[in-house]
Amino acid sequence: MPLVNMKDMLEHAHANGYAVGAFDLVSLDFLEAIMAAAEEARAPVILSLAESHFEYFDFELAMAATVRAARRASVPVAIHLDHGHSLEKAVQGIRYGCNGVMVDASHHPFEENVRITREVAEMAHGCGVPVEGELGYVPGVEGEDAERHPGEIAYTTPEEAERFVRETGVDFLAVSIGTVHGRMKGEPRLDFERLKDINARLGIPLVIHGGTGLSDEQFRRLIAGGVTKINYYTALSDAAAGVIRGNAATDAKGYTALVAGIREAMKAECLRCIRLWGSEGRAEEVLEHARPWREVEHLIVYNVEGIDEDEVLARAEEGRRVLGAIPGVRSAETGVAVNGDAKYRYCWLVRFCHPAVIDSYRDHPDHVRFADEKFRPVAGDRISIDFLLDE
């Protein structure tokens, strides 16, 4: 089960002078190409799903496939919500299986960015999930993603970066030093001295958004300056589109004929990046260093007194809705014993994304209210056990 703690993964990269690719995916073809490249290169990898792309796929369904791909991998994998724009979206991402989240409030004034990012960080840390913030603004220039990032570049200042990390508690920081979302126009000019100063002040993994179009030497200098996570999408999209255009030119008929070969093209681009960024062959080191990402099953078996079967089922339905919305809860299910002679007739199965949720869930006001008012008064006969799952 090589789904691993993303903070451990990136801290290993930061300490050892390489970067992990955070490849954005928008379909199963992207997912399979990214994982095939990581497996061949024996490299850690981050599977990234951006809120700005949700119009292209059903987030919940895509996450189910992404979690399964990570769980069956033999290399270390983390799953990241990219460019989340709200607390609610971060909670949803964690519920669906992300074990890293980015809150992008960089378009807001500094104080508002701090407020929003701190709120997300406090919630996510209560779930054991690390958080990426962004300071400064990385605009779009041209290409598929450019229109999603309008406006002018705003560079990250070292002084504000230091204050931002201190006041928000983020684990990683995305910085703006001259890259753009989409495709570069002309020769990219990156402020490496700015990056060097930020890295010296913070000492945490830094992130670059807008990796497409940079030269090999620029990537090397970014990594030397503390960049540990590189977000990458446009070049993968362009590689797939190029294959489709070539297939169309041969008068290919039907969907499968048009997309034939796109996984191989995207895999080749992922492999090129993995090798350039220094993560090739690091899988075993990271698996040794990073804690496995293990979920918890919160099991309650119980009997009731003082209410009838209809009321039991009504309270269970209410509980599934209320408890299932608590941050860090991946699912909340109820059941009735198949065997009528069983010692306990009813059960709760509440899946936590991480052991940290045991405490945050117990103390959450919605759980306390439901347990004190609707559950404990009628379920005195109960057993509760938390199981750490092997997957």
Image (tube, helix red, strand yellow):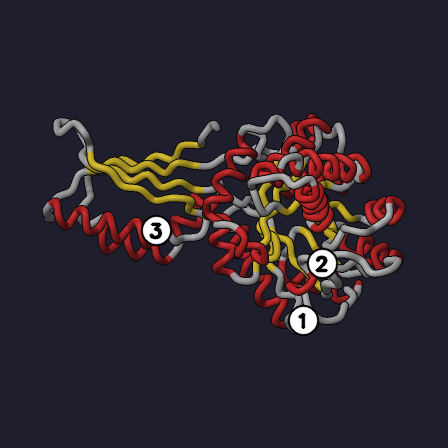
On screen, residue 18 versus residue 133, left or right, reads right
Tell me the SS state at disc 1.
helix
| Residue 229 in picture, x, y percent from top left | 72, 46
Which one is earlier in the sequence, the residue at label 3 or at label 2?
A: 2
Is residue 309 something that shows in the picture? yes
Q: Quadrant of residue 260?
A: top right
Quick one: quadrant of the N terminus? top right
Task: Please name the residue that numbered disc 2 is placed on.
Answer: 143
State the CA–CA distance, disc 3 to disc 1.
34 Å
On screen, residue 351 versus residue 235, left or right, reads left
| Residue 28 in picture, x, y percent from top left | 56, 39
Q: Is residue 149 above or below residue 195?
A: below
Q: What amino acid type should be assigned to the residue bearing mark 3?
A: Leu
Task: Please name the residue that numbered disc 1 is placed on.
Answer: 110
| CB contact under 8 Å: marks 2 and 1 | no
State the CA–CA distance, disc 3 to disc 2.
42 Å
Tell me, for residue 323, which label it has, or none: 3
What residue appears at the point 30 percent right and 49 percent down from the top-left corner? 320
Q: What amino acid type should be assigned to the residue bearing mark 2?
A: Gly
Q: Residues within 10 Å of mark 1 (few under 14, many from 20)?
A: some
